[in-house]
Amino acid sequence: MSYGLLNAGADIKNQAMQGMRSAANEENQRNMQNKNIEAQGKAAKKSNAAAGAATGAMIGVQAASSAAAAAGMTAGTGTLVASGLATGGLGLIAGLVLSELF
């Protein structure tokens, strides 16, 4: 009779250990998924910032070129670069802000 009680106790212990292993595995999976979601968010933020900077730089270079053409002169490389950098910086800021909002 004591063997029956010992076996029952061992079975209950094994079930408890299996439940604990299962819970630990699920927690590990949740942690990995949360890390992946966080990494995706950071990657999206960097992508948005880069897109904003590129768009701002393009707009600045195009605006400087258009302004020079309207004035009847050619825009120098320095003017185009300075304009592109200035508006690229604004685009970078806009990309970061928008990625934080959305």
Image: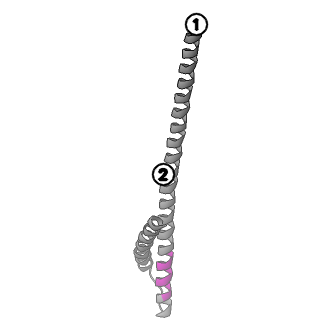
Residue 7 drawn at (x, y percent): 58, 12
Vertical placement of 93 versus 65: above or below? above
Quick one: 57 or 47, which is closer to the camera?
47
Q: Distance between the residues labelled 1 and 2?
A: 52 Å
Range drawn in magenta? 58-66
Name the quadrant containing residue 90.
bottom left
Residue 12 placement: quadrant:
top right
**Foreground pick, 43 / 77:** 43
Provide the secondary structure element on which disc 1 rests. helix
Q: Residue, x 50% and y 56% (percent of image)?
A: 41
Q: Residue at x 51, y 61 (%)?
A: 47
Q: Do the residues labelled 1 and 2 touch (CB within 8 Å)?
A: no
Name which residue lies at 47% across and 55% down. Answer: 42
Q: Which residue is drawn at 44% across and 75% down?
A: 84
Q: Residues within 10 Å of mark 2 (few under 14, many from 20)?
A: few
Label 2 sits on a secondary structure element that is: helix
The kind of residue on which mark 1 rests is: Tyr
Q: Which residue is tagged 1?
A: 3
Residue at mark 2: 38
- Residue 101 shown left or right of residue 3 in the figure: left
Magenta stretch prevailing secondary structure: helix
Q: How is the image coloured?
A: one colour
Indicate the position of residue 18 as horizontal and vertical percent values. 56, 26
- Is 62 inside the magenta-drawn segment? yes
Mark 1 / mark 2, whichever is N-terminal: 1
Which kind of residue does numbered mark 2 sit on?
Glu
